[in-house]
Image (tube, rainbow, N blue to C red):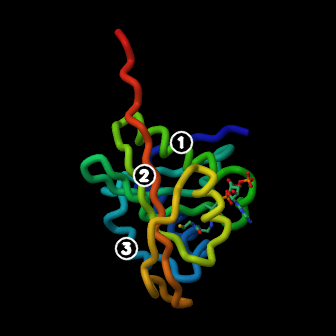
Amino acid sequence: MMRITRTMQETDLSLVIGIESRAFSHPWPPKAFEDVLSMRPWVLVVDGILCGYIFYHTVLDEAVILNFAIDPDLQGKGHGEHLLSSTLELLQKEGFTNFYLDVRQSNASAIALYVKYGFLALGIRKSYYSDPVEDAIVMGKKLPLPERETL
Ligand SMILES: CC(C)(COP(=O)(O)OP(=O)(O)OC[C@H]1O[C@@H](n2cnc3c(N)ncnc32)[C@H](O)[C@@H]1OP(=O)(O)O)[C@@H](O)C(=O)NCCC(=O)NCCS
């Protein structure tokens, strides 16, 4: 299996919007993807098939994951874990040390993945989501600064 994580291109948009509409009960509307290329989005391509994506924004030493999904037909094969871990690794190398995200309280598979990668529950946003209305758990993770490479 050949997994490639690469920057999302405009030509990936229709596939990404298709995955979004099938992966979430309340997907981002297509219009919300207009600015997505400015969010440093990554896609995961497995054996030539676009399987998932992750978008985040960064400020100071923080990175906030805004959206993350794997095609429902291709979940449970380690792709989500691969995309999350390669994103965290890249961001850590760039010097980001604080990571945050929101997740639906009932989203057991995503929460299990985040906990596996050391995210802790930091708080609750009451009734943050709709379709169905549900609280968000705010999760965060702190990483040490990468060791400086010696010349
Ligand atoms: C959350 C999501 C990205 C995980 O991707 P995935 O490719 O299905 O997950 P992986 O196969 O890489 O699994 C990695 C870990 O996730 C957790 N996980 C994945 N599926 C799970 C399930 N059905 N039940 C419980 N834990 C699960 C486990 O911790 C798993 O590690 P393990 O295999 O050692 O137990 C994917 O399910 C998804 O896109 N869901 C819909 C969109 C979504 O909820 N995005 C997150 C929004 S915050």
Name the residue: 54% across, 89% down: 131
* Disc on res. 86: 1
Amino acid of disc 1: Ser
How far apart, in angstroms, are the residues tagged by discs 1 and 2?
Answer: 18 Å
Q: Can you give x and y, in whole percent of width and height, for residue 85 in the image?
A: 56, 45
Q: Is residue 102 above or below residue 115?
A: below
* Quadrant housing residue 80: bottom right
Q: In this view, does 67 lie above or below 82?
A: below
Q: Which mark is residue 32?
A: 3
Q: How crowded is mark 1: few (under 14 residues within 10 Å), some or many (20 or more)?
A: few
The tag earlier along the polypeptide, 1 or 2, is 2
Image point (61%, 65%), residue name: 111
Kindly report which numbered mark, 2 or 3, lies closer to the viewer in this rendering.
Answer: 3
Query: In the figure, is residue 25 to the left or right of 63?
Result: right
Judged from this view, the residue extending furthest toward the left is 60
The numbered dot on residue 9 is 2
Q: Residue at x 52, y 70 (%)?
A: 103
Secondary element under disc 1, as helix, strand or loop, is: helix
| Image x and y of residue 119, in percent | 53, 55
Given the image, on which type of amino acid does mark 2 rest? Answer: Gln
Secondary structure under the numbered disc 2 in the rendered image: loop
Please provide percent x and percent y for residue 114: 58, 57
Dot 3 or dot 1, earlier in sequence: 3
Q: Which amino acid does label 3 sit on?
A: Ala
Give how far apart the Cα atoms at labels 3 and 1 are.
25 Å
Taking the image as shown, residue 91 lies to the left or right of residue 25, namely left
